[in-house]
């Protein structure tokens, strides 16, 4: 049970890292989506 307790203590650190990575991925995805939408808008305007 000693190992379990040790992992439990480190859990907070892992949680922070995972959340940090997750937020970066979400931010990156939103940025990519923004670029994609602006490109689509540009494409549609120039297609006319």
Image: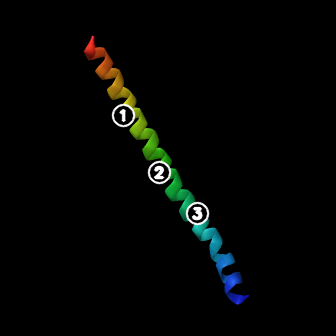
Which residue is tagged 1? 35
34 lies above or below 47: below
Which one is in front in this view, the residue at disc 3 or the one at disc 2? 2
Which residue is tagged 3? 16
Q: In this view, does 42 lie to the left or right of 5?
A: left
Q: Badge 1, how many Cα within 10 Å: few under 14, some, many 20+?
A: few
Residue contact at pointers 2 and 1, CB within 8 angstroms: no
Whole-number angstrom distance, CA of label 3 to CA of label 2:
14 Å
Q: Badge 3, how many Cα within 10 Å: few under 14, some, many 20+?
A: few
Q: Which residue is drawn at 58% across and 69% down?
A: 14
Please provide percent x and percent y for residue 23: 52, 51
19 lies above or below 36: below
Q: Is residue 36 left or right of residue 16?
A: left
Which residue is tagged 2? 25
Secondary structure type for disc 2: helix
Q: Earlier in the sequence, mark 2 or mark 1?
A: 2
Quadrant of image for the C terminus: top left
Which one is in front in this view, the residue at disc 3 or the one at disc 1? 1
Whole-number angstrom distance, CA of label 3 to CA of label 1:
29 Å
Quadrant of image for the N terminus: bottom right
Q: Earlier in the sequence, mark 3 or mark 1?
A: 3
7 lies above or below 30: below
Q: Is residue 17 left or right of residue 12?
A: left
Whole-number angstrom distance, CA of label 2 to CA of label 1:
15 Å
Secondary structure type for disc 1: helix
Please provide percent x and percent y for residue 39: 32, 28
* Closer to us: 17 or 3: 3
Q: Badge 2, how many Cα within 10 Å: few under 14, some, many 20+?
A: few
Q: Which of marks 3 and 2 is nearer the N terminus?
A: 3
């Amino acid at each position: 049970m000693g190992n379990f307790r040790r992992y439990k203590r480190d859990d907070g650190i892992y949680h922070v890292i995972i959340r940090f990575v997750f937020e970066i991925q979400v931010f990156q995805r939103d940025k990519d989506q923004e670029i994609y939408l602006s490109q689509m808008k540009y494409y549609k305007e120039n297609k006319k």
